[in-house]
């Protein structure tokens, strides 16, 4: 079941829907599978990507930067184990702001992860490259060409919310949106 783009921020949803329609029309269908990620899930992924020492240092750093709610979220989710998943602390992915979309390529009715990080030049490769090109043409920011995150497209050019907002601002907004 594809993820609905209805939950996305309206200024991002328009071009995001257009992007998916363009891919479909070009016979390179892309299927939305991810939109909003709750800070709790972001915290879990962030923790599993780090050692205990790095987690403790990160929590202390966020607290010092004025992001008490986000720091507390990392503490509350407890230890997590798995392979590396993200650089972004809770609040610091555009997925928490309803301004990011992840889609996979549908090649002959099957999901293809070619280039993501599968085979480069495989059948899905052209789908992901077209998706990134069209995203750029529509004023969105694809993260495939820049960092190899080929599924990801966002509504802001800045790599992370902390590039345009202070941590106290991010923290207040996360608490407002997802609090309690
Ligand atoms: Zn993403």
Image: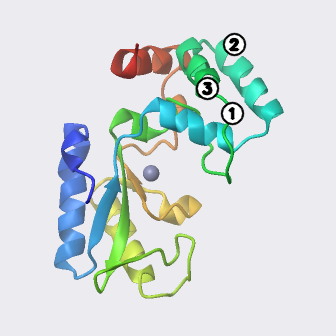
> Residue drawn at (43%, 39%), measured in percent from left and top?
94
> Residue drawn at (49%, 17%), measured in percent from left and top?
171
Mark 2 vs mark 1: in front: 1
Whether residue 154 is visible, yes or no, is yes
The mark that comes first in sequence, 3 or 1, is 3
Left or right side of 88 for 123: left
Q: Nearer the viewer, residue 3 or 10?
A: 3
> Residue drawn at (52%, 44%), measured in percent from left and top?
159
Q: With respect to residue 78, does 112 lie above or below? A: below
State which quarter of the image contains the N terminus: bottom left
The mark that comes first in sequence, 2 or 3, is 2
Numbered tag placed on residue 79 in the rendering: 1
Local crowd size for mark 1, using a 10 Å CA cut-off: few (<14), some (14–19), many (≥20): some
| Residue 83 position by quadrant | bottom right
State which quarter of the image contains the C terminus: top left
Q: CA distance from mark 2 to mark 3?
A: 14 Å
The mark that comes first in sequence, 2 or 1, is 2
Local crowd size for mark 2, using a 10 Å CA cut-off: few (<14), some (14–19), many (≥20): few
Numbered tag placed on residue 31 in the rendering: none
Numbered tag placed on residue 74 in the rendering: 3
Q: CA distance from mark 3 to mark 1?
A: 9 Å
> Residue drawn at (35%, 41%), measured in percent from left and top?
36
Mark 2 near mark 1, Cβ–Cβ under 8 Å? no
Q: Which residue is mark 2?
A: 64
């Amino acid at each position: 079941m594809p993820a609905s783009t209805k939950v996305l921020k309206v200024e991002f949803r328009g071009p995001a829907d257009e992007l998916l329609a363009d891919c479909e029309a070009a016979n390179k269908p892309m299927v939305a599978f991810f939109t909003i990620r709750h800070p709790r899930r972001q915290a879990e992924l962030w923790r599993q990507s780090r050692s205990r020492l790095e987690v403790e240092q990160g929590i202390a750093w966020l607290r010092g930067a004025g992001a008490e709610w986000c720091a507390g979220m990392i503490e509350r989710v407890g230890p997590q184990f798995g392979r590396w998943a993200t650089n972004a602390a809770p609040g610091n992915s555009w997925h928490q702001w309803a301004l990011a979309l992840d889609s996979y390529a549908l090649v002959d009715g099957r999901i293809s992860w070619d280039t993501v990080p599968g085979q480069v030049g495989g059948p899905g490769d052209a789908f992901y490259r077209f998706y990134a090109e069209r995203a750029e043409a529509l004023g969105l920011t694809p993260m495939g060409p820049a960092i190899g995150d080929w599924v990801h497209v966002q509504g802001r050019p800045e790599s992370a919310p902390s590039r345009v907002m202070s941590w106290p601002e991010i923290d207040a907004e996360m608490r407002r949106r997802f609090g309690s």
